[in-house]
Amino acid sequence: MTNLFGTTLPIVQAPMAGVQASALAIAVGNAGGLGALPAAMLSTDALRAELTAIRDRTRGPVNVNFFCHTPPPPSAEREAAWRAALAPYYAEWGIDSASMPAGPGRTPFGAEALPVLAALRPAVVSFHFGLPAPELLAEVRALGSKIVSSATTVAEACWLEARGVDAIVAQGIEAGGHRGHFLSDDLTEQPGTFALVPQVVRAVRVPVIAAGGVADRATVLAALALGAVAVQVGTAYLLCPEATTSPPHRAALQADDARHTALTNLFSGRPARGIVNRLMRELGPLSAKPPAFPLAAAALAPLRAAAEKQGRGDFSPLWAGQNISGCAAIPAADLTRALAGVGS
């Protein structure tokens, strides 16, 4: 990891859009791990401000993460069908669905981000859902940043290696948040972390980072024993004070319900793992009703806001992996060192 990213610990903080900003990346970086900043929900100005804050407050390397999805064309028919499915909830909460705007809540990587990256030169630029267009990828590589992307299958790992990535995140099916798949939508092709990692290690020559189900020192050691050079951890950081996790999300993580997670496309239009809540129970976690990613989120936004004001996560994406045992309301630096097995 020192040679690859310049870190002293084999701990990579997962980029988690919506539940973190620069503070978490700074804390992990100062502890010796690789902090990450999710950029999919940031404007160019916000990205510049967050990266500047990281540069000013840590000497450690940082990973800036982008999505690589292709925005779908808006479909009035699918949007209307989705809002019709949500109509009983709008009525329950007194929300006028006709007054709500439609539109994506996440932006894919584009040329507009290049000047910011050129000015601040992060050590690592990572991608989810594949890679950007070759010409954009070449621009990022020319900055000297290491290129990393996620794979959910051996085939995806080989595809990434053939396109010159410096490392691969092997994301097991138990990982929280959005699935990184891009070659196939078939979730049955995606194995668990401890089945995926050794297969990817054997199939590629670039370093492999294990993600999914890693929550404590024992699971870190297990992943390293299978050939990973590092682990990527997300769920365990959600209760740290540096995370921006909402109060309903924090409460859910500390309740018995957190033991039941499922893959769902209700909140964004793309499969992601979260704690089962009211919306998932009543509509079913995977449904043909939501518009394509990321258009599903807009219709849920007022329901989510109204419920969260009352401390409820009924309509919120309560992202979490299958192993929530490592979640602790402790400083992120302490958690990072504990995962690495070093004293504070």
Image: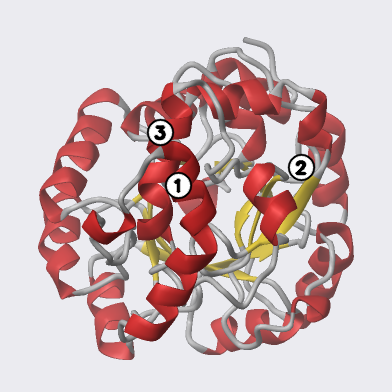
In the displayed structure, does residue 293 sit left or right of residue 232?
Answer: left
* Residue type pointed to by label 1: Ala
Question: What is the CA distance from the residue labelled 1 to the residue labelled 2?
Answer: 41 Å
Left or right of residue 97: residue 48:
left
Residue positioned 32% across, 27% down in the render? 58
Q: Position of residue 103 (x, y in %)?
A: 27, 66
Residue under the point 74% across and 50% down? 281
Can you see residue 57?
yes
Q: From what the image shows, is residue 279 above or below residue 257?
A: below
Quadrant position of residue 173 = bottom right
For marks 2 and 3 on the same chain, the one whose residue lies earlier in the sequence: 2
Q: Which disc, if any, is residue 214?
A: 2
Q: Classify 268 as above or below 320.
A: below
Tags 2 and 3 touching, CB below 8 Å: no
In this figure, which residue is indicated by the disc labeled 1?
91
Residue 101: where, in percent of width, then height?
23, 60
Circle 3 — which element?
helix
- Quarter where residue 156 is shown: bottom right
> Which residue bears the numbered disc 3?
306
Q: Position of residue 242 (x, y in %)?
A: 44, 21
Instruction: Name which residue type carries label 3.
Output: Ala
In the rendered structure, find residue 322 and report the number of the disc placed on it. none
Position above or below: 28 against 16 = above
